Amino acid sequence: VCRRFARALGGISTAALFNRLAFESPGFRDLLGKNVLLIGRLEDTNPTSIDGGKGQLARLSIDPEACVDKVDAFKTLIKLDPDHKESWEENLDWLRDVFQRAQKLGKPLYNEVLLLQKPGESKVEMAKRLPEGLVKIAEDFGPYGHFYKTQVPVLWVEENGKITKISSPKTIRATAEAMAQAVDRPMLLLSAAVDFEQYAAQYGIVADLFAGPMCGRAYFKEAFTAEATKDWDSLETSFRKIALSRIQQIKNLARIVSKPWWH
């Protein structure tokens, strides 16, 4: 799937994030294109859960030293609950170490953070914690990495077939402004599993505060369930049909409104 999607992008993205199964496969760089920044995901998708799921500890799937010749940049992900101090401190130490290693290797690190859902917490309850939680995470974790990849509060949540309004555009904007004050790195907006229609709205609200988008599933997830998708070839066709126009839409907005990352 990763190889097909890399080929289908056709160089439209300025950067692309892939896991080790992709970037370690033969000829992957040629599929992606020489002018696309290849970002390698370092973290294991199964972090260590502690204290009954109240905290998670990030860990590496691959060491940066082991893939430095295969990628142009590194990416880590940490899921955090500001109320769980043990995992908070351990993840800070972990991130500091990975950042120092990336600096020694001369490759940029994209530091991605997400708010961790508490055990038994609904999506709606978690979403209501985003404004305060994201700012706290930015204050402590923003100083590490060369780029800061984060979410913003959501406009709505769909849960159990019900759509619940969560945050206003004003709240989203205020949260992004507070994060921008705390983070002296270029910020990139992730989608955090929202649909494209919501991601496009979120990005429009904060585009001038962020250096650019860094979105995945919101661009293409419908390709897997599209009626036309029957096999690998048709999946690639569905990806092209669904994702490329969305990528171009956000790319155009970023080019016009967002501040270049080197400023």
Image (cartoon, helix red, strand yellow):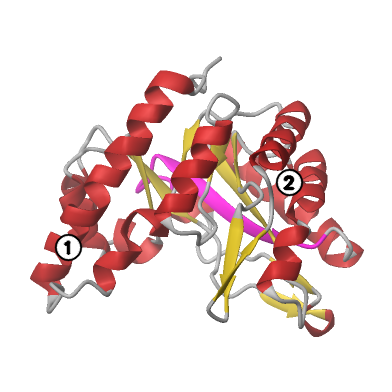
Specify the amino acid type for callout 2.
Arg
Mark number displayed over residue 238: 1
Residue at the image point whose x is 74% and y is 54% from the top: 130
**Dot 1 lies on which element?**
helix
Q: Which residues are magenta?
A: 68-81
Q: Position of residue 61 (x, y in %)?
A: 52, 66
Please state the horizontal and vertical placement of residue 140, each as a whole percent of the image: 82, 43
Eye-nearest disc, 2 or 1: 1
**Which tag, 2 or 1, sits closer to the chain's start?**
2
**Residue 5 versus residue 144 in the image, above or below:** below
Q: Secondary structure at mark 2?
A: helix
* Quadrant (top left, top right, bottom left, bottom right) of the N terminus: bottom left
* Mark 1 Cα shell of 10 Å, populated few (<14), some (14-19), many (≥20): many
Task: Find the residue positioned furthest to the left.
Answer: 233
The amino acid sitting under disc 1 is: Ser
Asked if the magenta segment contains residue 33, the reply would be no
CA–CA distance in space, label 2 to label 1? 40 Å
Q: Residues within 10 Å of mark 2 (few under 14, many from 20)?
A: some
Q: Nearer the viewer, residue 208 or 160?
A: 160
At 76% from the left edge and 59% from the top edge, which residue is drawn?
Answer: 128
Q: Position of residue 239 (x, y in %)?
A: 21, 59
Report which quarter residue 216 is drawn in.
bottom left
Q: Residue at x 52, y 18 (%)?
A: 262
Residue at label 2?
A: 96
Q: Quadrant of residue 164?
A: bottom right
